[in-house]
Image (cartoon, coloured by chain):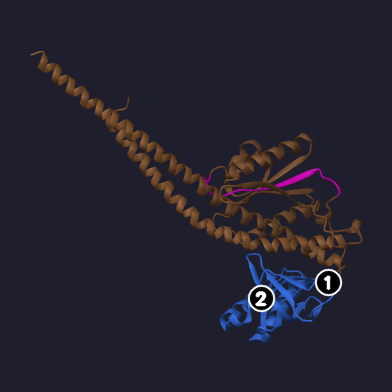
Amino acid sequence: MSEEFKVEIVNPEKSFLVKDDVSEVVVPAFEGEMGILKDHISIISFLKPGIIKILSKSGDANYYVEDGIVEFKNNNLSILTSTIFNLADMDKSKLQDLLKQAEEEANKTDINDQSKYLADQKIEVLKTLN
Amino acid sequence: MASLDDLKKRIASVKSTQKITKAMKMVAAAKLRRAQESAEKGRPYSEKMNNVILNLSNGISDKENAPKLLSGTGQEKTHLCVVMTSDRGLCGGFNSNIIKKAKNYFAKILDEGKELKIITVGSKGNDQLKRVYGDKIIENISFKDSKNANYFDADKVGKIVIEKFEAGEFDVCTIFYNQFKNVITQIPQAQQIIPLDNEGEDSSSEESYEFEPDEDEILSNLLPKNISTQIFKAMLENSASEQGSRMSAMDNATRNAGEMVDKLTIEYNRSRQAAITKELIEIISGAESL
């Protein structure tokens, strides 16, 4: 039996990625990184800023996301996100831009703890990428 | 009967109108392709989002304490209607269809003695509604500056709606928009977004999910997002419908202008002929009398 399942990443504008030969996906879930293999139990969870790793036959890929929802059901993994970038397409200047945005957000005084936490997360992830 | 000169002028003016409508049709057709594409591409996201929420709400054990955005405030006294129209005119029945649908709904609500509040998105809707329901409109949002429907704008509207809901300003929220079916058919829709309307879509899957973090937290995070998503979907459908509607309206206008030019040309030729004949008769009878 094959050990592959289907991944679909959609953002509000379009269907970002569809792949059906995926062997493992690592997502930055809210309570820690989570690896998903075939026949995982049905799950719904949130994403925090981080890297999605997709391991598949046709090559591995890494994506940077800022938020999102993952749903896994019947060997279908759906990732809904509003901000996603393929790391392969990201250059230094883009990274710097995002980092700057995140830092600005983190330095605001009128934000609540949750957005502060998210902004800090973004900075941390983006710094490791640099 | 109009003089020859007048007819000539009219023909020229109809012809230039025809040129304009033809150009508008071309522009609308080009924009339509893009808008239609993005509407179709945007559908999976909102559908998936809806599915996740349906699965979640089916799995929720404690219905009593479910978030208010999902289950409502328990009463339906004040209705908020978000009427989404375009910012530009000359698009056939596009705006009036939405307004008609919305007005029917308003009448029903007011008949039942409930309170009504309106948010208009797009200036055309505001123009048409403020005459009758001017005192009910609490906000008018317009995205004249943004070229295409984008999620950022939708999120703004969504935030306003949620803010007002949390402030207890309304109990039920419905959005009005045109669903794009094809170029000639757009269906005006009324979609209830608060509380979430999941009747008829009883998903049969009894599968249980694992949640991380727990259901409540996921729901309370997801529901506001869903509102923005649904509004965004409505905006996408609307912009595709607007262009489609404009295209067919302009196509009709171009055809009508063509017919009018033909008719006027015939009339022009007839009166020219009549003038010539009249002159001839005058000359002949003048010669005869000599």
User: Could you tell me which residue is drawn at 69 percent across and 64 percent down?
Assistant: B45
User: Could you tell me which residue is drawn at 32 percent across and 35 percent down?
Assistant: B265
Q: The disc labelled 2 sits on which kind of residue? A: Ala
Q: Is residue B93 magenta?
A: no
Q: Is residue B15 left or right of residue B204?
A: left
The residue singled out by tag 1 in the image is: A42
Nearest the viewer among B284 and A34 is: B284
Q: Secondary structure at mark 2?
A: helix
Counting the numbered discs, the total is 2
**Position in image of residue B185 (x %, y %):** 60, 47
**Position in image of residue B201 (x %, y %):** 80, 54
The reply to whether dot 2 and dot 1 touch (C-beta < 8 Å) is no
Secondary structure mostly seen in the magenta stretch: loop
Q: Which chain is blue?
A: A
Crowd band around label 1 with a 10 angstrom C-alpha radius: few (<14), some (14–19), many (20+):
some
The residue singled out by tag 2 in the image is: A102
Relative to A16, is A59 above or below? below
**Position in image of residue B93 (x %, y %):** 57, 42
